[in-house]
Amino acid sequence: MTPGDAAPVEVLARILRPAGGGVYVVSTGLAEQRALQRRVYGAGSDAEVDARWRAALGRLGEAKVALLGVPSDVGAGFTRGANRAPAALRAWLMDRPGHPVWRITDAGDVRVVPQLLSDEMLAPAQIAATRAALYGDDPLADGLPVSPLDLCALALDRLFALAPDLVPIVLGGDHSVGWPGFLAAHRHWEQARGRRLGLLHFDAHTDLLETRLGIKYCFATWAWHANELLGRDGRLVQVGVRASARPQDHWEAALGVRQIRAAEANARGAAALADEIVARFERLGVDALYVSNDIDGTDVAWAGATGTPEAGGLTPTLVSDLTRRVAARFPLVGGDLVEVAPPLAHGAPGEPGRTLDTAAGYLADLIECAGG
Ligand SMILES: [Mn+2]
């Protein structure tokens, strides 16, 4: 049996965990994880948490928007901690019951083995060993992947099998999860259904390396691969770049992207930028939008708890306004929010609450633009 043979909900039940439970813990962190899960599900026991999560999986077929946590930071490169975002943001939002996240279906978290990233990087013996550890001798788990990026892509594929019009919102994790997020959207919407995606990407960095230290998929390469899927035809627009070894015209000439650096973005404002991006996407035949929001595109004043902070960034107002203006013209069919790293606040006053507030706003933008 291959993973394609089992019912989508049965696959999801094996490769996901209840919300907040994707980080594997044994002793340290276990009490905190259980407490959060009981709060999120309004449950009194682990069994009840599990039952309510499975009930949520059962409702996915009718869902319009769904949240998928990917608590992995193995794709990061400088400072880690983004694996804690899916749990920390849900905990933060527990105190904000009016937030739109509580109106949508939470599919839970991808199971994360914290030393793995992509199955392509693993020897067959490692895949077999981890598969046995994760799934035991479950016959329905035969052939399932074991690494976060592959599990995320498979989960999104099965979500689309359950609900073809679903808009999944991926909550990372480092920016490597943007790769399975966009790949799944491209397979479903562009390759299978003939739509043309535009990719709006907020970031301090270009993420446009083909490989980094020989690694194909990581935080610094996902946008290169996404741009290849788009055929380098100009449908990748990057906003907020300010930390790059090469100038803007290099990336625009070499890869066909449009890059609006942070200083230009802040000077022109959301309305003018939206006009440019909408006109560009219209000219290129775009009819569906994917937004990848790396919180380090935002200035450290509002989002300091992240792995590679850079001064001189975007304001949250600009990021939100631009997202909503472009999504008002092209339907949002997928998105991710990545690089929120609550442990990296370094004791700065008001952090990591300020970053979580900024992230909560961006999550609301994605959910509401998706119609949730
Ligand atoms: Mn990034």
Image: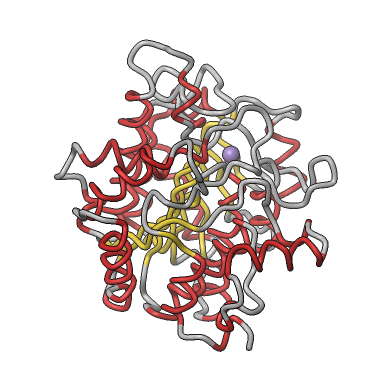
Is 277 left, or right, of 217 in this rendering? Answer: left
Residue 364 percent coordinates (x, y) = 28, 46
Name the quadrant where ligand 1 sits. Answer: top right
Residue 288 in the image: above or below residue 61: above
Residue 186 percent coordinates (x, y) = 56, 68
Residue 318 percent coordinates (x, y) = 37, 32
State which quadrant residue 252 falls in.
top right
Looking at the image, can residue 321 be seen?
no
Is 19 left, or right, of 117 in this rendering? Answer: left
Residue 185 in the image: above or below residue 244: below
User: Which one is nearer the viewer's eye here, 165 or 86?
Assistant: 86
User: Which one is nearer the viewer's eye here, 74 or 304?
Assistant: 74
Q: Residue at x 64, y 43 (%)?
A: 74
State how the image is colored. Answer: secondary structure
Residue 266 in the image: above or below residue 291: above
The quarter of the rendered structure image containing the N terminus is bottom right
Residue 312 percent coordinates (x, y) = 51, 18
Residue 189 in the image: above or below residue 139: above
Q: For the image shown, how many numbered marks are present on the structure?
A: 0
Q: Residue at x 34, y 57 (%)?
A: 329
Q: Residue furthest front?
A: 27
User: Which one is nearer the viewer's eye here, 254 or 300?
Assistant: 300
The quarter of the rendered structure image containing the C terminus is bottom left
Q: Residue at x 67, y 52 (%)?
A: 117
State which quadrant residue 272 falls in.
top left
Looking at the image, can residue 288 be seen?
yes
Q: Residue at x 46, y 71 (%)?
A: 12
